[in-house]
Every structure is written in structure tokens, then in C-alpha cells.
Image (cartoon, rainbow, N blue to C red):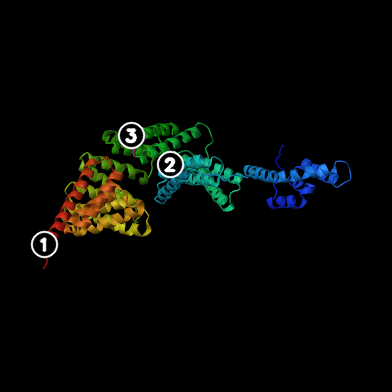
Amino acid sequence: MHISPPQSPRRKPLAWLLLVVGGFLGAHRFYLGSYLGGAAQLLLLLVGVSSLPGSGFCLGLLGPWLLFDIYWVHVRLKRQDEIDAARRPTAKTYDLEALSHADALRERFVIAAETHDWARAVALGEQIVANARKVFKGPHQNLAMSLCMHGQACYQFKAFDEAKASLEESLAIGRQIGMPAEDMDIVRKALAMTLAGIGEHHAARQLRAGLPAGRGPGDDTVLLGLLEDQERRYKAAFERRDLALAERLCAEAVHTSRQLCGGGLGKAVVLHLINHAEFCRQLQWHDKAVSLLDECLAIIDQLGLDDSWRLGPSNTLALLHAGAGRSEEAEVLYKKTIAMAVALSKGNSTDEVVRAINNLAFLYATTDQDQKAELCYARAMVHLDKLAPEENGKGDADLHADLLINFAQLHMARNEAAHAKPLFERALAIQERSCRGISTSAATAHNDLGLIAQEEGDLREALKHFKRTLLLNQICAPDHFGNLANAQRNIDNVSLALAAVARAARLEPST
């Protein structure tokens, strides 16, 4: 007998009740959708109770049929369960390992955002979005918010086109899936800020290039876009410490800025020449860097720009002279830099003033002019105290830490550990707040604090600092094998000394 599936879900208890109570009427079959079978059973009943010929046979046939229907109802209800299960939407299952990886990426993204490391945040945001696309395979609130995170990081990194694309896609997904209103508001506000930033950035880059604001589209707009892309790429390369690539991309940016400014005279040319010279200095291409800076200062003179433009090139040129052993030329330039920084600050304390004085003090310290170095460092400390980086968390944290470490190392060279120790500790406090204490400056401070503790006889404290030094060097400067070897050697020496102390304590007779 063919059993056709029911057209709509039925309740099991009612089906069995109808079989027991109204089985002779075919009620259970009508209920379960077998209308032809139900009609046949009803007809057999009607003929059986009539006085027509063969009525007894009809009743005799109906009885076994109802017994068979016990099995039929069971099969029918089971088939219904299977159909209901097939029609019921299944819960989506996701790759738990991929979701765990996404959570780890978000934690790293938050850390990068808190430390304002936007280049790293953008890279992590791209990984988060890619992971969300892989896991959810379609529109999902998690993907929309991941795109929003990436867009906000791109906005902070000034990658406005990427920010706009991510936020627009996030908004489109939000509308498609009916994302909560508060989340949609977050995306809309971020997109509005990005669109405003695009307009402001376009006007600013025209001004930086020395072009009148609102200049119409054409070749200038194309060159501005190209220059912006080149600048973004060489800054990203520098963030990754790929100096060779940064120098090459920056050279291309200088060429583009010359085209943009016609005869090669413009603020954009100055800006990129300064960066190009700094990359060459770090690559130790001193002659090329000096040539670039000389050209930069000449353009500043021709354009009649103020000392705020001259400050950076003069400082870098002084660093080059100092690195080449021309201390007298470096000293003259550092003093000019200090004078310009003080004049520009209008008597206030600024990072530029601190940097200029710190550089001169370091020059004196490396040329055995300790008394002059100490006076300069003390002067720089006065400005640093006015900035109060420990209280407001503002300013160049690396500069502040470097000043404190330089001054502390001057005291160390003069065997004045008591004066050096608080300076190292203050430098570590600044680094801990700015980058969680993960930097080469922090490694230097821990190493010297370890030496001070070792000298004071506190071997456990010394071992703690030396271990931290080794870890930071492994993270921040894994290619500096000399630093790694020195840190390991200090750990081994202190560990042996601690073992010897412990052994002596065990051998000493009790009193």
C-alpha cells in the first residue's frame, strides 16, 4: 500500500486517539491526510451496518484493516517527524578554532589601538575582516563590526580611501541584516568622520604642496593622489623598519613633489627631502643625506619659510656631523637648533626644545665634556619636568625616556649609581605607559638597573632585570647578537653567584 506524506504537521496523541475512538469511521486517516483511505473505511462501515448483500464481508474486512492501521499510523507519524526535521532550519555551526583566532586578533588590535600603533592596527584589522569572511561566509553582524573596526583604524592611520570602503560595506551589511540601531550609529558616525577627513586632507595636502586651496581637478589632483599614496607607503615601510624600501619610495615621493611644484620649489619638496635625508642617515649614507639636507635648507631660504621648517633639517644635519666626528660643526648647529626651538616655543617647554638640548648634551658626553653634558642634561630635565609626561601622558615618550637614560648613563660613567637609579626607573615608567615597556630603551634601562643591583649585592633583583633585558632584546632587536650575548652572560654570572651563596648557606654550621 502506498503511504503518501502528510501535507501539514499533526499531533501524535490526537492521531492515536482518533484511531481508537473513531477508527471505524476512518477519522485517523482523514486527520493524517489519507483522505481516500478514510473514505474507503467509512464506506465499508456504512455498507456493513446496512442490510445490503455482502455487508458482513465488509465488516469482516474493516476489522483487519484497522489492526493494520496501528502499524500504518506509526509509520505515518515517523515519516512526518523526518519531514519536519528536514524542513526545520538547522543551526549554523562555526569553526571554533577560527573563532578563537579571531578573539586573539581582536585582543592584539585593542592593544595596538591603545598604544596608537595604527599601522599595526590596520594590519590586524585586515586579518580580522579576512577571518570573519572565512568563518561566517556571508552577511553577519560580526563581519559588519569587524569592517567597522578596520575602517576606524584606517581613519586614524590617514588611509581615508580604505576607511571609506570598509565603513560603507559595514553599513550596507548592517542594513541587509537589520543590525541594532546603536551599532548602526557607530558605523554612521565613523563614516561621517572619514568623509570629513577626506575633505580636510585634500585641502591640507594642497596647502602643504604650496598650491592654492580649492584648485580644480586635473593633473595636479592626479599627482596629489600619487604623492599621498607614495607617502603612505614609505611611512608604512619605515614602521616595519624596512629602511631600504622606505628610502626608495621616499625618493619617488620627492620626484613626484618636484613635478607637482613645477620648478622644484615647494613645501611638499621640503617635507619629503627631510624624510629622505633621515632615511639615508639611518642607512649610514652620510654624504647623500648631507646633500639632501643642504638642498632642503636652500629651498627653505628661497621660499622664505620660518624657522619651524628649518628646525628638523638643522637637527638632522647636526646628527650627521656628530656621527662623522665633526663635533665642532655639530655643536654650532645644535646651538642654532636650540635657539630656534626656544624661539618657536615662545618661552614654553616643548618636545622640540627637549630634543635639541638632549642632542647637544649627548654630543658633549661622547666627546668627554662631562661638565657641559651635565649642565645641558639638567637644563633639559627642567623642561621635561614642566612637560610632566608621567602625569599627562603626552609628548614623545621615546624622547623623554632617551633623555632620562642618557643622563643616567652619564652618572653611571662617573660611578654615581645613586643618581642614575631614579632616572632609569622614571624612564621605565614612561615606557611602560606608552608601549607596555617593550622597547630597546627599556632594555637598556633594565640592563643598567641590573648592574646597579648587582653592585649593591641584591642578586635576585639583578637577575630579574637581566632576564627582562634578554627578553626585550629578543623581541625588539633580535639581530643585535652582541646585546643578546651580553644579557645572557649577565644572567649566567648572577645565577652562578646566587648558587654559590645558596651552597655556602647550606654548608654554614647552625649556631
Sequence-earlier tag: 2 or 3 = 2
Judge from the rendering whether residue 24 lies leftward or rightward of residue 501; answer left or right.
right
- Residue 15 in percent (x, y) is at 71, 50
Residue at the spot 18% in from the left edge and 49% down from the top edge: 492
Tag 1: amino acid: Glu
Visible residue check, residue 406: no
Give yes or no for residue 379 being in the magenta stretch. no
Mark nearest the camera among 2 and 3 is 2
Earlier sequence position, callout 2 versus callout 1:
2
Q: Position of residue 49 (x, y in %)?
A: 85, 47
Around disc 3, counting alpha carbons within 10 Å, would you say few (fewer than 14), some (14 to 19), or many (20 or more)?
Answer: some
Q: Is residue 244 magenta?
A: yes
Label 2, residues with CA under 10 Å away: few <14, some 14-19, many ≥20: some
**Callout 3 secondary element:** helix
Q: Residue at x 76, y 53 (%)?
A: 21
Query: Between disc 3 and disc 1, whose residue precedes?
Result: 3
Q: Is residue 307 left or right of residue 49?
A: left
Q: Residues within 10 Å of mark 1 (few under 14, many from 20)?
A: few
Which mark, residue 244? 3
Which secondary structure lies at badge 2? Answer: helix
Look at discs 2 and 1 and give the one toward the viewer.
1
- Residue 508, label in figure: 1
Q: Which residue bears the numbered disc 2?
A: 123
